[in-house]
Amino acid sequence: MSIRRHDPDRKDRIIDAAIGVIAEHGVAGTTHRLIAAAADVPLGSLTYHFSGLDDLRAQAFRRHAERMSVIYEAHFRGVRTRAEFVEAVTDLIDGDAGASAPDWAIAYELYLAALREPALREITEAWMRSSRAVLERYVDPTTARGVDALIEGLVMHKTLSTRPVSRQDIRTIVERTIGPTP
């Protein structure tokens, strides 16, 4: 008879490992074996805790989105003026807001996967609503939607470009998108 190891954090460790594997290998390269190895658990633990790779991936994406929403909201805490808002958005795009390159890689993996898996769109929608709710503290809902898209797009351009947009150009784009002080 084998002794069962008490490991109450195993499921959480597997989800966190899945996030890391997705960041490193992308959705297409993510396998049960890679996740189990990264979590240091037997392969059977994945099938015990999750109905399949899609379920595990969805839970990993959900956790990542929730964590990033907390970081996003904290980034804007203390912003009171339009100038501070412009600076906070500029910092976010320029990479000075607590999100790393792997964090953005996971986000883009989620977006791509959500194009093909409608169940993942609920996660992206919730994440976008959360982001816009933070932005709506400073601008109207339509502008918040535009600023949210601007952040996503400029971060993607910065990530993929061999000649990223300068910080000053980012600030100018953000100022123009937000518009003049009402």
Image (cartoon, rainbow, N blue to C red):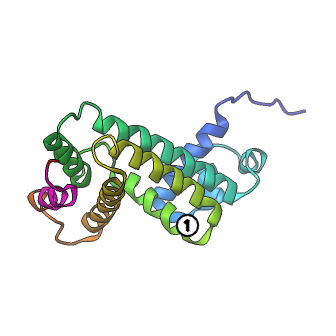
Location of residue 18 in the rendering, given as x and y in whole percent from the top left corner = 57, 51
- Badge 1 crowding class, 10 Å Cα cut-off, few under 14, some 14 to 19, many 20 or more, is some
Q: Farthest residue toward the right?
A: 1
The secondary element bearing badge 1 is classed as helix
Tell me which amino acid carries mark 1. Answer: Ala
Location of residue 55 in the rendering, given as x and y in whole percent from the top left corner = 69, 54
Residue pointed to by mark 1: 113
Front residue of this view, candidates 167 and 109: 167
Q: Is residue 156 left or right of residue 181?
A: right
Q: Farthest residue toward the front?
A: 182
Front residue of this view, candidates 179 and 63: 179
- Does 95 sit above or below residue 26? above
Q: Is residue 133 left or right of residue 89?
A: right
Q: Is residue 6 magenta?
A: no
Q: Farthest residue toward the left?
A: 168
Residue in view at x 21 percent, y 55 percent: 178
Location of residue 66 in the rendering, given as x and y in whole percent from the top left corner = 50, 42
Front residue of this view, candidates 86 and 63: 86
Tell me the quarter of the picture where residue 79 sits: top left
- Does 72 sit above or below residue 158? above
- Does 155 sit above or below residue 100? below
> Which residues make up the magenta segment?
170-180
